[in-house]
Amino acid sequence: MANSSPELIRKYQVPSPRYTSYPTVADWTRTPAESEWIESLSESLDQCSAIGRGASIYIHIPFCESLCTYCGCNTRISRSHGVSEPYLNALLKEWELYQTRLGREITVDEIYLGGGTPTFLSAAQLESLLTGILSKVKVAAAPLFSIEADPRVTCEEQLSTLARLGFRRLSLGIQDFDAKVQERVNRVQTEDQVGRVTDQARSHGFNNVNFDLIYGLPCQSPRSIQQTFEAVRRLAPDRISLYPYSHVPWIKPAQRGFFETDLPSFEEKAQLLEECQKFLAEDGFYEIGMGSFVRKSDPLWSAARERTLSRNFMGYTPRQTSPLIGLGVSALSASWNVFSQNEKILETYQSRVEAGELPILRGHVLTSEDHVLRQQILNLIIRYETSWEGLESQASCLESVALRLKPLEMDGLIEVSPTACKVTELGRGYLRNICMAFDGRYLERLRLSR
């Protein structure tokens, strides 16, 4: 992993998508009718069934006991766990609506519980929710079941229940182990707490533990990052997701508690990234793309080498992307041709489901040009290279993409030929910026704003 200079970080520190979809949610332009979404989803399920694959299910649990002030997720803060029962009923009702609309047996390959804090739910609630879904589907061989968890509110009974139901991957939100940083972002948790949950998960059969880490948080320093990674080394996760902190207080008001002086400067942020990269290299982690680091024993590493790696709204997956059915408030769904997102307000979501409606708020029906550009961006994200030879007539922005890539080439981030480009070692830290050169809808929005 090549080190970035402060000048490069400053130059490319611009708002940019994570490209878990293309077009990105901000550029969705045509929400599908419910019938159109179901038809597209059914077609995708047929295609997957033909190759022995099934659907992925994402379940969004929005509840958290406290607000982490760096967070950008759709959450509902509550100390009362009674709020979860009506929501669980709505989730199961929404799943029934999908089964009725699709009118078929559904095979499930993957389940991902995200949040919020999925372990806000008790062991009994987790079992009720998951058995309510799994009892009505066919589970594929070797399914991939994953859950995000907060070490502060996760207990062994929950982990034992999840393991019995087939969960083998656990993702823990760590962010930083430094006490001052934790206090500043309102997420105070000890190494002992994280170690306890990690050890308990592994004792119950979880074979892949991921740590989420963020650099660029308020009050971080090279020394605090070193201490964080020393703790990470002792706890020995299997994967690390490393993200830069994105300061968007006009979108996330909780971030207004941070002053600009609390945040690392560009020079300091470059130092922090350098410390992260140094540790990851020394401890045997390899980047597969977009801040995802794995050991060579990880299935994602093998998938990257064998060119079967893919990416969806949940991140990287070692298998070809399946149709994704999102359940819950603000949950995202995708067939190959259509995207959709559920209502983002909890009460509206619950009332629509109770009325027997699929709670679609917005979405997008992909055009032929969208498909071409999505594949270009996906190639970059999972293979670090792409070629658009012969595709210029299908996507007009490809006619000038080489010109837009020139500055990135001059900065050493990519190698470019007339109709192809390859990301350099240095450029791996700037994948989002490289992808933006292929993002036709972003470029059009930029043109119209001038």
Image (cartoon, helix red, strand yellow):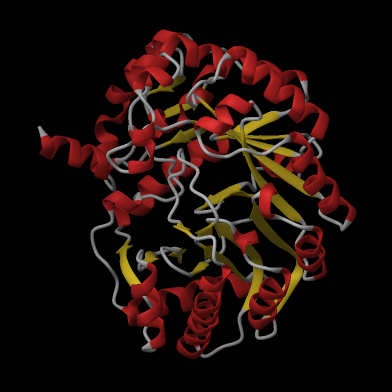
In the image, residue 393 above or below residue 45: above
Q: Is residue 448 left or right of residue 218?
A: left
- Residue sitting at 65 percent across and 53 percent down? 149
Residue placed most toward the observer, 89 or 294: 89
Task: Place residue 261 in its image quadrant.
Answer: top left
In the image, residue 18 above or below residue 50: above
For the question of whether residue 252 can be seen, the reply is: no
Image coordinates for residue 249, horizontal then vertical, percent: 32, 37
Image coordinates for residue 137, horizontal then vertical, percent: 66, 82
Image coordinates for residue 407, horizontal then vertical, percent: 33, 16
- Residue sitting at 50 percent across and 75 percent down? 87
- Residue sitting at 77 percent across and 71 percent down? 165
Q: Is residue 398 left or right of residue 110?
A: left
In the image, residue 273 above or below residue 72: above
Number of marks in the image? 0
Q: Name the residue furthest right.
A: 203
Task: Place residue 167 in its image quadrant.
Answer: bottom right
Image coordinates for residue 175, horizontal then vertical, percent: 59, 34
